[in-house]
Image (spheres, helix red, strand yellow):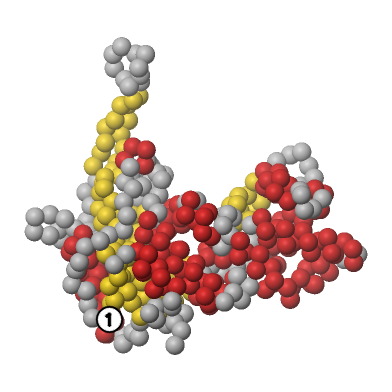
Amino acid sequence: MSKNFVNFHVLISHSPSCLNRDDMNMQKSAVFGGKRRVRISSQSLKRSIRKSSYYREHLGDASIRTKKLSELKEKLVKCLADRYDIELIINTLKLLSDKDLNTEAAVEGDAVAPWAVEEVAWFCEQVRKAGEQGLDAKKLAKQLKPEVEAMRKSLANGVDIALSGRMATSGLMSELGKVDGALAVAHAITTHVVDADIDWFTAVDDLQEMGSGHLDTQEFSSGVFYRYASLNIAQLQENLGNAPREKTLEIAAHVLHMMATVTPSAKQQSFAAHNMADLSMVSFSDIPVSLANAFEAPVKSAPGGGFLSPSIDELHRYWERVHKGYGLEERCAEFALKPSDTPEGIRTLESLESLKTWVRSDGKE
Protein backbone atom coordinates (compact mmCIF):
# COMPACT_ATOMS: atom_id res chain seq x y z
CA MET A 1 0.00 0.00 0.00
CA SER A 2 1.31 3.46 -0.89
CA LYS A 3 2.34 5.64 2.02
CA ASN A 4 1.66 9.36 1.71
CA PHE A 5 4.48 10.83 3.78
CA VAL A 6 8.23 10.60 3.26
CA ASN A 7 10.19 11.44 6.43
CA PHE A 8 13.83 12.52 6.20
CA HIS A 9 15.98 12.17 9.33
CA VAL A 10 19.57 13.39 9.05
CA LEU A 11 22.39 13.56 11.58
CA ILE A 12 25.21 15.81 10.46
CA SER A 13 28.25 16.89 12.46
CA HIS A 14 29.50 20.37 11.65
CA SER A 15 33.05 21.36 12.49
CA PRO A 16 33.55 24.83 14.08
CA SER A 17 31.33 27.27 12.21
CA CYS A 18 28.61 29.91 12.42
CA LEU A 19 26.10 28.82 9.81
CA ASN A 20 23.09 30.90 10.81
CA ARG A 21 23.03 34.22 12.73
CA ASP A 22 20.37 36.29 14.48
CA ASP A 23 19.80 40.06 14.46
CA MET A 24 22.63 40.51 17.00
CA ASN A 25 25.10 38.66 14.76
CA MET A 26 25.15 35.77 17.24
CA GLN A 27 24.50 32.12 16.40
CA LYS A 28 20.84 31.22 16.27
CA SER A 29 19.91 29.02 19.20
CA ALA A 30 16.92 27.40 20.87
CA VAL A 31 16.09 26.01 24.29
CA PHE A 32 14.97 22.38 24.02
CA GLY A 33 14.61 20.12 27.03
CA GLY A 34 15.57 23.14 29.13
CA LYS A 35 19.05 23.30 27.54
CA ARG A 36 20.53 25.62 24.92
CA ARG A 37 21.10 24.15 21.48
CA VAL A 38 22.57 25.76 18.40
CA ARG A 39 19.99 26.12 15.65
CA ILE A 40 19.88 26.48 11.88
CA SER A 41 16.53 27.88 10.78
CA SER A 42 14.41 26.10 8.21
CA GLN A 43 14.42 29.29 6.14
CA SER A 44 18.21 29.22 5.98
CA LEU A 45 18.32 25.54 5.12
CA LYS A 46 15.60 25.78 2.46
CA ARG A 47 17.26 28.78 0.78
CA SER A 48 20.60 26.97 0.71
CA ILE A 49 18.90 23.98 -0.90
CA ARG A 50 17.02 26.13 -3.39
CA LYS A 51 20.19 28.01 -4.40
CA SER A 52 22.40 24.92 -4.65
CA SER A 53 23.93 23.79 -7.93
CA TYR A 54 22.41 20.33 -7.31
CA TYR A 55 18.92 21.86 -7.23
CA ARG A 56 19.53 23.75 -10.49
CA GLU A 57 20.87 20.63 -12.20
CA HIS A 58 18.16 18.21 -11.10
CA LEU A 59 15.05 20.30 -10.35
CA GLY A 60 15.46 23.28 -12.69
CA ASP A 61 15.67 26.99 -12.04
CA ALA A 62 14.42 28.07 -8.65
CA SER A 63 11.65 30.63 -8.40
CA ILE A 64 12.44 34.34 -8.05
CA ARG A 65 11.49 35.43 -4.51
CA THR A 66 11.03 39.16 -4.38
CA LYS A 67 8.70 42.05 -3.66
CA LYS A 68 10.65 44.35 -6.01
CA LEU A 69 8.19 44.21 -8.88
CA SER A 70 10.01 46.73 -11.07
CA GLU A 71 13.15 44.61 -11.07
CA LEU A 72 11.02 41.48 -11.55
CA LYS A 73 9.40 43.11 -14.58
CA GLU A 74 12.80 43.69 -16.17
CA LYS A 75 13.85 40.09 -15.54
CA LEU A 76 10.61 38.65 -16.92
CA VAL A 77 10.82 40.82 -20.02
CA LYS A 78 14.36 39.56 -20.58
CA CYS A 79 13.30 35.91 -20.15
CA LEU A 80 10.04 36.02 -22.12
CA ALA A 81 10.57 38.71 -24.77
CA ASP A 82 11.24 36.10 -27.46
CA ARG A 83 7.79 34.57 -26.81
CA TYR A 84 5.53 37.52 -25.96
CA ASP A 85 5.26 41.24 -26.60
CA ILE A 86 6.77 43.35 -23.84
CA GLU A 87 3.44 45.14 -23.35
CA LEU A 88 1.69 41.79 -22.87
CA ILE A 89 4.28 40.64 -20.30
CA ILE A 90 3.93 43.87 -18.30
CA ASN A 91 0.13 43.73 -18.48
CA THR A 92 0.19 40.12 -17.27
CA LEU A 93 2.40 41.00 -14.30
CA LYS A 94 0.06 43.91 -13.53
CA LEU A 95 -2.92 41.55 -13.46
CA LEU A 96 -1.07 39.04 -11.29
CA SER A 97 0.15 41.60 -8.74
CA ASP A 98 -2.57 44.27 -8.99
CA LYS A 99 0.17 46.90 -9.19
CA ASP A 100 0.65 49.58 -11.86
CA LEU A 101 4.01 48.81 -13.44
CA ASN A 102 3.76 51.45 -16.18
CA THR A 103 5.55 54.03 -14.08
CA GLU A 104 9.13 55.19 -13.67
CA ALA A 105 8.87 54.98 -9.88
CA ALA A 106 9.98 51.74 -8.23
CA VAL A 107 7.03 49.44 -7.51
CA GLU A 108 6.99 46.92 -4.68
CA GLY A 109 4.58 44.11 -3.86
CA ASP A 110 2.94 43.61 -0.49
CA ALA A 111 5.42 40.92 0.57
CA VAL A 112 8.29 38.80 -0.69
CA ALA A 113 6.62 36.21 -2.93
CA PRO A 114 7.93 33.48 -5.25
CA TRP A 115 7.55 33.89 -9.01
CA ALA A 116 8.22 31.15 -11.55
CA VAL A 117 9.09 32.26 -15.07
CA GLU A 118 7.20 29.43 -16.76
CA GLU A 119 4.15 30.07 -14.61
CA VAL A 120 4.13 33.72 -15.68
CA ALA A 121 4.57 32.50 -19.27
CA TRP A 122 1.44 30.35 -18.83
CA PHE A 123 -0.48 33.41 -17.65
CA CYS A 124 0.89 35.45 -20.58
CA GLU A 125 -0.62 32.89 -22.92
CA GLN A 126 -4.00 33.10 -21.16
CA VAL A 127 -3.94 36.92 -21.22
CA ARG A 128 -3.15 36.82 -24.94
CA LYS A 129 -6.11 34.51 -25.60
CA ALA A 130 -8.34 36.68 -23.39
CA GLY A 131 -7.37 39.71 -25.47
CA GLU A 132 -8.41 37.90 -28.64
CA GLN A 133 -11.75 37.00 -27.01
CA GLY A 134 -12.29 40.52 -25.66
CA LEU A 135 -12.40 39.42 -21.99
CA ASP A 136 -11.73 41.88 -19.18
CA ALA A 137 -9.76 40.98 -16.02
CA LYS A 138 -12.81 39.75 -14.06
CA LYS A 139 -14.02 37.50 -16.86
CA LEU A 140 -10.48 36.23 -17.35
CA ALA A 141 -10.22 35.28 -13.65
CA LYS A 142 -13.56 33.49 -13.81
CA GLN A 143 -12.53 31.63 -16.95
CA LEU A 144 -9.21 30.53 -15.42
CA LYS A 145 -10.53 29.17 -12.14
CA PRO A 146 -11.19 25.66 -13.57
CA GLU A 147 -7.71 25.75 -15.16
CA VAL A 148 -5.72 25.67 -11.92
CA GLU A 149 -4.46 22.13 -12.60
CA ALA A 150 -3.09 23.19 -15.97
CA MET A 151 -1.46 26.23 -14.36
CA ARG A 152 0.17 24.09 -11.69
CA LYS A 153 1.83 21.93 -14.36
CA SER A 154 3.91 24.97 -15.26
CA LEU A 155 5.51 24.70 -11.79
CA ALA A 156 7.15 21.39 -12.79
CA ASN A 157 10.06 23.29 -14.36
CA GLY A 158 11.08 24.64 -10.95
CA VAL A 159 9.44 22.87 -8.07
CA ASP A 160 10.29 25.00 -5.06
CA ILE A 161 6.88 26.74 -5.07
CA ALA A 162 5.24 23.29 -5.13
CA LEU A 163 7.50 22.22 -2.25
CA SER A 164 7.41 25.35 -0.08
CA GLY A 165 4.06 26.87 -1.05
CA ARG A 166 2.95 30.44 -1.77
CA MET A 167 0.63 32.96 -0.14
CA ALA A 168 -0.41 35.85 -2.40
CA THR A 169 -2.49 38.78 -1.14
CA SER A 170 -3.39 40.80 -4.22
CA GLY A 171 -4.17 40.55 -7.91
CA LEU A 172 -4.98 37.53 -10.02
CA MET A 173 -2.32 35.49 -8.19
CA SER A 174 -4.23 35.83 -4.91
CA GLU A 175 -7.29 34.23 -6.57
CA LEU A 176 -5.53 31.45 -8.46
CA GLY A 177 -1.94 31.14 -7.29
CA LYS A 178 -2.15 30.11 -3.64
CA VAL A 179 -0.22 26.90 -3.02
CA ASP A 180 -0.04 24.82 0.16
CA GLY A 181 3.55 23.69 0.63
CA ALA A 182 4.21 19.95 0.34
CA LEU A 183 7.53 19.94 2.20
CA ALA A 184 7.66 20.73 5.93
CA VAL A 185 11.18 21.47 7.17
CA ALA A 186 12.11 21.70 10.85
CA HIS A 187 14.74 24.00 12.31
CA ALA A 188 17.88 21.90 12.70
CA ILE A 189 19.14 21.71 16.30
CA THR A 190 22.12 20.17 17.99
CA THR A 191 21.43 16.87 19.74
CA HIS A 192 23.43 18.08 22.75
CA VAL A 193 24.18 21.17 24.78
CA VAL A 194 26.61 23.56 23.10
CA ASP A 195 28.89 26.11 24.75
CA ALA A 196 29.73 28.68 22.10
CA ASP A 197 33.22 30.12 21.59
CA ILE A 198 34.20 33.58 20.49
CA ASP A 199 36.61 34.10 17.61
CA TRP A 200 38.54 37.34 18.04
CA PHE A 201 39.82 38.12 14.59
CA THR A 202 41.77 40.77 12.77
CA ALA A 203 42.03 41.82 9.18
CA VAL A 204 45.64 42.65 8.40
CA ASP A 205 46.22 45.64 6.14
CA ASP A 206 49.16 44.79 3.91
CA LEU A 207 50.00 48.48 3.45
CA GLN A 208 49.94 49.23 7.17
CA GLU A 209 53.22 48.59 9.01
CA MET A 210 51.80 47.97 12.50
CA GLY A 211 48.47 46.90 13.96
CA SER A 212 45.54 45.73 11.89
CA GLY A 213 43.00 47.31 9.61
CA HIS A 214 40.02 45.74 11.36
CA LEU A 215 39.21 44.05 14.69
CA ASP A 216 36.03 42.16 15.54
CA THR A 217 34.58 39.08 17.22
CA GLN A 218 32.33 36.29 16.00
CA GLU A 219 30.52 33.60 17.95
CA PHE A 220 30.98 30.05 16.67
CA SER A 221 30.62 26.43 17.77
CA SER A 222 30.59 22.85 16.56
CA GLY A 223 28.01 20.12 17.06
CA VAL A 224 25.90 17.25 15.78
CA PHE A 225 22.68 18.56 14.22
CA TYR A 226 19.40 16.71 13.72
CA ARG A 227 17.67 17.75 10.50
CA TYR A 228 14.11 16.68 9.82
CA ALA A 229 11.72 17.22 6.91
CA SER A 230 8.44 15.61 5.85
CA LEU A 231 7.15 15.45 2.28
CA ASN A 232 3.41 15.13 1.60
CA ILE A 233 3.29 13.14 -1.64
CA ALA A 234 -0.41 13.77 -2.42
CA GLN A 235 0.02 17.52 -1.86
CA LEU A 236 3.06 17.60 -4.14
CA GLN A 237 1.14 15.70 -6.84
CA GLU A 238 -1.67 18.26 -6.60
CA ASN A 239 0.75 21.21 -6.62
CA LEU A 240 2.33 19.91 -9.82
CA GLY A 241 -0.99 19.52 -11.63
CA ASN A 242 -1.74 15.94 -10.56
CA ALA A 243 1.73 14.67 -11.36
CA PRO A 244 2.28 10.88 -11.26
CA ARG A 245 3.64 9.42 -8.01
CA GLU A 246 6.85 8.36 -9.81
CA LYS A 247 7.68 12.01 -10.48
CA THR A 248 7.20 13.00 -6.84
CA LEU A 249 9.37 10.06 -5.71
CA GLU A 250 12.11 11.30 -8.03
CA ILE A 251 11.81 14.73 -6.38
CA ALA A 252 11.88 13.05 -2.94
CA ALA A 253 15.17 11.33 -3.85
CA HIS A 254 16.66 14.72 -4.75
CA VAL A 255 15.35 16.27 -1.51
CA LEU A 256 17.11 13.47 0.37
CA HIS A 257 20.36 14.21 -1.44
CA MET A 258 20.19 17.91 -0.58
CA MET A 259 19.18 17.30 3.04
CA ALA A 260 22.30 15.16 3.37
CA THR A 261 24.79 17.34 1.51
CA VAL A 262 23.77 21.01 1.33
CA THR A 263 25.16 23.35 3.99
CA PRO A 264 24.25 27.01 4.55
CA SER A 265 26.83 29.39 3.11
CA ALA A 266 27.13 31.83 6.04
CA LYS A 267 30.74 32.46 7.15
CA GLN A 268 31.89 29.48 5.12
CA GLN A 269 34.82 31.45 3.70
CA SER A 270 36.05 31.69 7.31
CA PHE A 271 35.09 28.24 8.62
CA ALA A 272 34.62 25.92 5.59
CA ALA A 273 32.29 23.56 7.49
CA HIS A 274 31.36 21.69 4.32
CA ASN A 275 30.38 18.49 6.12
CA MET A 276 28.32 15.63 4.71
CA ALA A 277 25.65 13.85 6.73
CA ASP A 278 26.87 11.04 8.95
CA LEU A 279 23.51 9.29 8.85
CA SER A 280 20.50 9.66 6.56
CA MET A 281 17.30 7.77 7.39
CA VAL A 282 14.13 7.78 5.28
CA SER A 283 10.74 6.35 6.15
CA PHE A 284 7.49 6.04 4.21
CA SER A 285 4.55 6.40 6.59
CA ASP A 286 0.85 7.29 6.82
CA ILE A 287 1.55 10.32 9.02
CA PRO A 288 4.53 12.70 9.36
CA VAL A 289 6.79 11.49 12.19
CA SER A 290 9.57 13.65 13.68
CA LEU A 291 12.21 11.98 15.85
CA ALA A 292 13.39 15.26 17.45
CA ASN A 293 12.24 14.11 20.89
CA ALA A 294 15.05 11.55 20.82
CA PHE A 295 17.16 14.53 21.86
CA GLU A 296 14.80 16.25 24.31
CA ALA A 297 17.25 15.11 26.95
CA PRO A 298 20.57 16.30 25.52
CA VAL A 299 22.95 13.55 24.45
CA LYS A 300 26.02 13.00 26.65
CA SER A 301 29.40 12.61 25.01
CA ALA A 302 30.77 9.11 24.50
CA PRO A 303 33.63 7.82 26.67
CA GLY A 304 36.68 9.47 25.19
CA GLY A 305 34.56 12.23 23.62
CA GLY A 306 32.30 12.71 20.66
CA PHE A 307 28.54 13.18 20.31
CA LEU A 308 27.98 11.45 16.98
CA SER A 309 27.87 7.78 18.01
CA PRO A 310 25.60 8.37 21.04
CA SER A 311 23.34 10.55 18.86
CA ILE A 312 22.97 7.73 16.32
CA ASP A 313 22.25 5.24 19.12
CA GLU A 314 19.66 7.55 20.68
CA LEU A 315 17.95 8.13 17.32
CA HIS A 316 17.69 4.38 16.75
CA ARG A 317 16.36 3.72 20.26
CA TYR A 318 13.73 6.45 19.94
CA TRP A 319 12.67 5.26 16.47
CA GLU A 320 12.18 1.77 17.91
CA ARG A 321 10.08 3.08 20.83
CA VAL A 322 7.85 5.23 18.59
CA HIS A 323 7.59 2.51 15.95
CA LYS A 324 6.46 -0.14 18.44
CA GLY A 325 4.50 2.16 20.76
CA TYR A 326 2.27 3.51 18.01
CA GLY A 327 2.28 0.41 15.80
CA LEU A 328 3.56 2.42 12.86
CA GLU A 329 3.59 0.55 9.60
CA GLU A 330 6.60 2.27 8.11
CA ARG A 331 9.00 1.29 5.41
CA CYS A 332 12.36 2.53 6.64
CA ALA A 333 15.96 2.49 5.39
CA GLU A 334 19.17 4.36 6.16
CA PHE A 335 22.70 5.00 5.03
CA ALA A 336 25.42 5.75 7.59
CA LEU A 337 29.13 6.43 7.22
CA LYS A 338 29.99 3.85 9.85
CA PRO A 339 28.20 0.72 11.14
CA SER A 340 25.94 0.90 14.19
CA ASP A 341 23.40 -1.29 15.96
CA THR A 342 20.46 -0.72 13.65
CA PRO A 343 17.04 -1.81 14.98
CA GLU A 344 15.08 -4.52 13.24
CA GLY A 345 12.81 -2.89 10.68
CA ILE A 346 15.38 -0.44 9.34
CA ARG A 347 17.10 -1.58 6.18
CA THR A 348 20.76 -0.54 5.94
CA LEU A 349 22.14 0.50 2.56
CA GLU A 350 25.73 1.04 1.53
CA SER A 351 25.58 4.51 -0.02
CA LEU A 352 23.47 7.62 -0.36
CA GLU A 353 22.90 6.72 -4.00
CA SER A 354 21.48 3.32 -2.91
CA LEU A 355 19.14 5.09 -0.50
CA LYS A 356 17.99 7.43 -3.27
CA THR A 357 17.26 4.41 -5.49
CA TRP A 358 15.26 2.89 -2.63
CA VAL A 359 13.22 6.12 -2.35
CA ARG A 360 12.56 6.14 -6.10
CA SER A 361 11.25 2.57 -5.82
CA ASP A 362 8.70 3.69 -3.18
CA GLY A 363 10.72 1.88 -0.51
CA LYS A 364 9.59 -1.48 -1.88
CA GLU A 365 12.88 -2.97 -3.08
The residue under the point 64% across, 46% down is 68
Nearer to the camera, 90 or 21: 90
State left or right for residue 249 relative to residue 292: right
Above-or-below relation of 229 to 53: below
Quadrant containing the N terminus in the rendered view: bottom left
Looking at the rendered structure, the secondary structure element under dot 1 is loop
Above-or-below relation of 220 to 45: above
The residue under the point 37% across, 38% down is 269
State left or right for residue 58 relative to residue 328: right
In the rendered image, residue 281, in percent from the top left (x then y), is placed at 32, 69
Q: Which residue is mark 1?
A: 345
Q: Quadrant of residue 296?
A: bottom left
In the rendered image, residue 284, in percent from the top left (x then y), is placed at 40, 78
The residue under the point 70% across, 58% down is 120
Q: Is residue 158 visible?
A: yes
The residue under the point 53% across, 77% down is 245
State left or right for residue 141 relative to residue 280: right
Nearer to the camera, 344 or 317: 344
Badge 1: residue crowd in 10 Å (few <14, some 14–19, many ≥20): few
